[in-house]
Amino acid sequence: MLKKVFGSAVFGVEATTITVEVNVDSGIGYHLVGLPDNAIKESNFRIAAALQNNGYKIPGKKIIVNMSPADLRKEGSAYDVTLAIGILAASNQIKTENLEEYLIMGELSLDGSLQPIKGALPIAVKAREEGFKNFILPIQNAKEAAIVNNLNVYGVENIKQVINHFDKGEPLEQTIINTREEFYKNLDFPEHDFADVKGQESIKRCMEIAAAGGHNIILIGPPGAGKTMLAKRLPSILPPMTLHEALETTKIHSVVGRVKEHTGLMAQRPFRSPHHTISDVALVGGGTYPQPGEISLAHNGVLFLDELPEFKRTVLEVMRQPLEDREVTISRAKFTVTYPSSFMLVASMNPSPGGYFNDPDAPVTSSPAEMQRYLSKISGPLLDRIDIHIEVTPVPFDKLSDDRKGESSVDIRKRVTEAREIQTKRFEAFDHIHYNAQMGTKQIRKYCILDDSSKKLLKTAMERLNLSARAYDRILKVARTISDLEGADDIQGSHISEAIQYRSLDRDGWLG
């Protein structure tokens, strides 16, 4: 007897429906076809034990299981429950009415309990698109899938519940969440708050400007000055995620299986901080069966690269194109996947191998040659894509011991959001430009017009500080953001002079 059960495979951030056809015939043998990987080939042992422990069995007949489309590579252990229900249905051990209305996924333990799967959200989106009414999956992933409306999501703990549902008509408990309510409930509770940071007022100002214009930023300072502490708090002052952004972000994390158990939509912007030993593939994504990398997991959030010069040069080079295009395309012989990667880059570094260059109180321990070798690792094209360079100095004791709280992230976020709204209005005619950092040369000429005194000021600064040509556009972009924060229509001299301060690495004495 032939039965069809439906599962799903995830490629990139999209899912494809898989039809599992099970045919039970006279004879003996178990044949699994349709390009399954080893994890799926081993599933018959898990299924046999799980069914045995729940009062059922794999029949001693000839079983042929085809996973269609047969030319598409299937991977992972998430098809266990799909195959098990197919075998029970085809061998008439259970009644299965309306089986074509169900999409079933889950990995089995030997006692029949279900283990969580990856990609529950994209699978649920595809299931609704293709007209499925019900989705049965492990209870740990139920909230994540229940984000999708017009689809009945049933989270189950054991295969026995699924069998009883079909065979005895026992109802399964539907998971229902109010997506909007859940989302807005968690928006205003950032994990890290700027109120905890003592002193560092100028750096906080810098962070506010970076957040308001979406500018990439590099923090330069000795160990213990607070670079990491400040970077961790940046997501808390970025504008709240829109529902669309939250869906996009949750989808990527779902594919990698990084959505926390029993949580639905991600309400906070992601903050990713990979170690400097990371490989190119782990950073941008890829592998034999491509997976999103750190830059995609940071989509709509912040990617923090601590100790930037310690990263391998090749790793930093592969990031150049995604920084420009805001997406990364991974090509293989048979297919191509594209992952979104629109993130804010925050980097930090010590000014020298010893860490204390530019600190008047510390001894100089690095020779000029060592300094040059250390700094040359990040010169050129990558720095070209970083708008703001800021020096971080250690906080004096009297500031550290002060009991007064700083300004909270929620207050700073209000100003940032107002500035972003001005930019959204300004760039509404452009598809791929949403904030100042994304402006190209054409937009800079149009929206960053200077009066004569500002031009003079910028000319003097560029000559005196020996700033490079690349610094010119960056200064204009940052000045535009500063004027947006003040609600000014035009860029003024004070905005230009503040923006000039944020180009430390372009000055003589830093990078040669």
Image (spheres, helix red, strand yellow):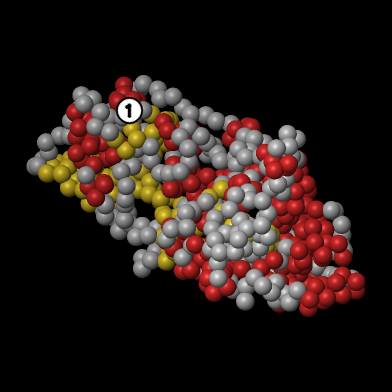
For the point 52% across and 39% down, the residue is: 148
Q: Closer to the camera, 470 or 415?
A: 470
Query: In screen coordinates, is 115 left or right of 40?
Result: right
Disc 1 marks which amino acid? Answer: Asn
The quadrant holding residue 400 is top right
Query: In screen coordinates, is 44 left or right of 378?
Result: left
Query: In screen coordinates, is 378 left or right of 62?
Result: right
Q: How many marks overall?
A: 1
Q: Position of residue 336 (x, y in %)?
A: 43, 64
For the point 42% across and 66% down, the residue is: 331
Q: Position of residue 265 (x, y in %)?
A: 55, 39
Confirm whether residue 358 shows in the render: yes
For the point 19% across and 28% down, the residue is: 52
Q: Position of residue 111 (x, y in %)?
A: 25, 28
Rendered position, 382 above or below 278: below
Write down the residue under mark 1: 158
